[in-house]
Image (cartoon, rainbow, N blue to C red):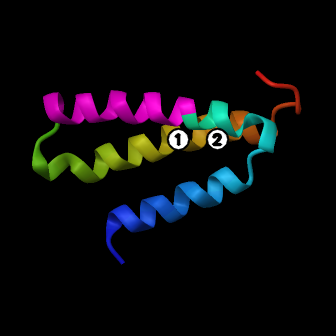
Amino acid sequence: MNPQKELEMFLNELLENIPPEKRSNFIEDFNKLSEEYDKRFKEEIKSEEWGIFLIRFLNDVLEFYNKYKYSKRSNN
């Protein structure tokens, strides 16, 4: 399986665990983070550093995932 497909599957699994009323906010936050990392990748990263960059990106995704999954059910 290619990395893009694996990332999609990973994100879909995360999304399924977010309370339904918070999913749209999670998606908005993910899109903002993704755009930020796309810009940084183009400006800062050498090809041999992409693995470290990806790990940092996924760590940030998990950080706000935990915010949505484990916060109280009210919309934040």
Q: Quadrant of the N terminus?
A: bottom left
Above or below, comparing residue 51 to residue 9 in the picture: above
Q: Residue at x 88, y 31 (%)?
A: 72
Instruction: In the rendered structure, find residue 3 and report the number of the disc placed on it.
Output: none
Residue located farthest toward the top when viewing the structure as drawn? 76
Q: In this view, does 35 lie to the left or right of 31?
A: left
Q: Is residue 76 magenta?
A: no
Q: What residue type is labelled 1?
A: Val
Which residue is disc 1 drawn over?
61
- The answer to whether mark 1 and mark 2 are in CB contact below 8 A is yes
Q: In this view, does 69 lie to the left or right of 41?
A: right
Q: In which quarter of the image is the C terminus?
A: top right
Question: Between 10 and 56, which is closer to the camera in this rendering?
Answer: 10
Q: How crowded is mark 1: few (under 14 residues within 10 Å), some or many (20 or more)?
A: some
Q: Is residue 53 left or right of residue 63?
A: left
- Image coordinates of residue 31 in percent, x first then y, are 46, 34
- Image coordinates of residue 42 in percent, x first then y, are 16, 34
Which residue is disc 2 drawn over?
65
Q: Give the range drawn in magenta.
A: 28-44
